[in-house]
Image (cartoon, rainbow, N blue to C red):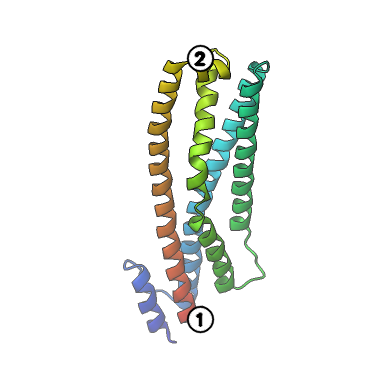
């Protein structure tokens, strides 16, 4: 494949690209791949920071309500779930940032695409979100009600507020998660397109 054919391929990816040598196009490819993967890393980093902040909140509130056994169990369960999410985010960031310098670009990108495909297609978050959300709402509501968890559950007014807040918050959270997943899927399609061009151009 000559340089002109290679140029035509990259024009399909980026219509604003100017004529470049094969080495320049290879460097441009590396930059585009890293930029796309960095978008996932930013999302994961934000998720990790949010998880750390939430765990801090859970520990502080649990300490302040140590005599409330049910509240303590609620927060401990939330802490465990959040730690799992935090571990998953950190592990994914590590794998995405691991350059695997011993691998050719094509194989390296294929590995990243397979990993991201599994993550974006995983629907576990949709099933766990309602459960996680109601425990979170209980934690926040009970703490600021200055009552025990069992007292809040027995209070009809509190239950009404919890139900309304839970439904509203859950809908908003689902919309946010769906939009984030859509952006990630679009970015993944872009990476898959780059991979196809690499295979075709034998870079």
Q: Residue 116 carries which label?
A: none
| Percent x, y of residue 187 | 43, 59
Q: Report the residue that reaches farthest toward the bottom.
A: 1
The answer to whether 128 is drawn above or below residue 91 in the figure is: above
For residue 145, which numbered disc appears in the image?
2
- In the image, 15 versus 193, the foreground residue is 193
Say which element carries label 1.
loop
Give the x, y percent position of residue 191: 46, 65
Q: Indicate the position of residue 75 as horizontal and vertical percent values.
A: 62, 28
Image quarter in which the N terminus is found? bottom left
> Which residue is painted at 50% across and 75% down in the image?
23
In the image, residue 65 above or below residue 15: above
Q: In this view, does 50 lie to the left or right of 67?
A: left
Q: Position of residue 159 (x, y in %)?
A: 45, 21
The correct choice, above or below, for 131 with respect to 157 in the image is: below
Circle 2: element type:
helix
Residue shown at 66% from the left, 21% from the top: 69
The front one of 201 and 75 is 75
Q: In which quarter of the image is residue 197?
A: bottom left
Determine the residue located farthest toward the top in the rendered image. 146
Q: Residue at x 49, y 56 (%)?
A: 120
Asked whether 166 or 28 is in front, the reply is 166
């Amino acid at each position: 494949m000559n340089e002109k054919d290679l140029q035509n391929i990259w024009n399909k990816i980026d219509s604003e690209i100017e004529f470049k040598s094969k080495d320049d196009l290879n460097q441009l490819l590396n930059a585009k791949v890293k930029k796309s993967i960095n978008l996932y890393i930013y999302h994961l980093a934000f998720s990790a920071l949010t998880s750390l902040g939430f765990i801090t909140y859970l520990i502080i509130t649990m300490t302040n309500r140590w005599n409330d056994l049910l509240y303590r169990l609620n927060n401990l369960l939330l802490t465990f779930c959040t730690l799992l999410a935090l571990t998953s985010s950190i592990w994914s960031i590590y794998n995405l940032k691991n350059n695997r310098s011993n691998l050719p670009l094509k194989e390296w990108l294929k590995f990243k695409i397979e990993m991201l495909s599994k993550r974006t297609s995983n629907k576990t978050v949709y099933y766990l979100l309602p459960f996680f959300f109601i425990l979170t709402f209980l934690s926040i509501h009970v703490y600021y009600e200055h009552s025990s968890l069992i007292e809040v559950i027995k209070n009809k007014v509190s239950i009404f507020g919890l139900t309304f807040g839970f439904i509203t918050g859950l809908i908003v959270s689902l919309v946010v998660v769906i939009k984030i997943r859509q952006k990630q899927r679009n970015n993944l399609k872009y990476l898959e397109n780059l991979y196809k061009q690499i295979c075709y151009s034998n870079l």
